[in-house]
Amino acid sequence: MLEQVRIGDLADKRILVTGGSTGIGAAVALAFAEQGSHVAVHYNESAEAARTVQAKVPQRIVLVQGDMGETGIARTVVDQAAALLGGLDGIVNNAGGMLGRVPTTQVTPEHFDRVLDLNAKSVWEATIAAYRHLKAAGGGFVINTTSVAARNGGGGGAVIYAAAKGFVSTLTRGQAKEFVADGIRVNAVAPGLIQTPFHDRYTAPDLMATQRAAIPMGREGTPEECVGAFLFLASQSLSGYVTGQVIEVNGGQLMP
């Protein structure tokens, strides 16, 4: 179990996890808390789920609410988290969503903007807001959640979402070079097909079966199976010479 593997330099780190109330974000937030980190769990509409996460390690978790798809809210969320935690040592940009499967020929300008605002613009805004807190702390880390879709174009009706995740992967590499002089490492984790509410909402059973058949391991992953990559990238002792990288966690679905 991950909670039995102690990563000493994560103790007492102050970390914001956006989109931390369900799925991969919740698993990551709990893993950091179990390592002794102080964690701000961001949520938007899933207040009850966020409180459930907090209740598991209440002495280590605080909650911050906000719609990351709205301009300026990402900065507010980051600053509130920093105020609650007394600063930041790391941020996990995990908030995002497909907002529906729509073929590109049917995408409206409004839908396009909503998908890009939530999945791309908010990551940029949150990271820029976190940058000054991380710099003030003497360095730290940014870990972005991208997707296998960033490399394969996404499944049916997910092209705009995939393109937004492609932005996140490229932003990761670019900001890694920009921030390195400040002792800030920027990396990303790219999950493949993972059992989360994301797919419960957006992926029909027949499409899920088709995607599952393309995975050499023959199954979906679990949120907990993504956690190790995040912990590794957060730990200076384990990954201090790693920056600008995207770790693929997909059961062999994509082998770049």
Image: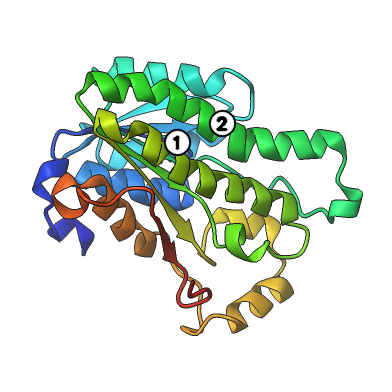
Badge 1 amino acid = Thr
Would residue 256 be found to the left or right of residue 101 on screen?
Answer: left
Classify 10 Å Cα crowding around label 1: few (below 14), some (14-19), many (20 and above).
many
Relative to 192, residue 117 above or below: above
Residue extending furthest toward the right: 105
Q: Quadrant of residue 72?
A: top right
**Residue at the spot x=82%, y=33% of the render?**
110
Residue at the spot 72% in from the left edge and 35% down from the top edge: 114
The residue that label 1 is drawn on is 18
Give how far across and how far down residue 115 sits, in percent.
70, 40
- 240 or 42, nearer to the observer: 240
Would you name the residue on which mark 2 appears?
Answer: 122
Q: Is residue 215 left or right of residue 207?
A: left
Q: CA distance from mark 1 to mark 2?
A: 10 Å
Residue 89 is at least partly visible in this image = no
In this image, 160 relative to 97: left or right? Answer: right
Q: Position of residue 220 (x, y in %)?
A: 51, 73
- Is residue 144 placed above or below 39 in the rendered structure? below
Q: Position of residue 214 (x, y in %)?
A: 60, 81
The residue under the point 59% across, 49% down is: 165
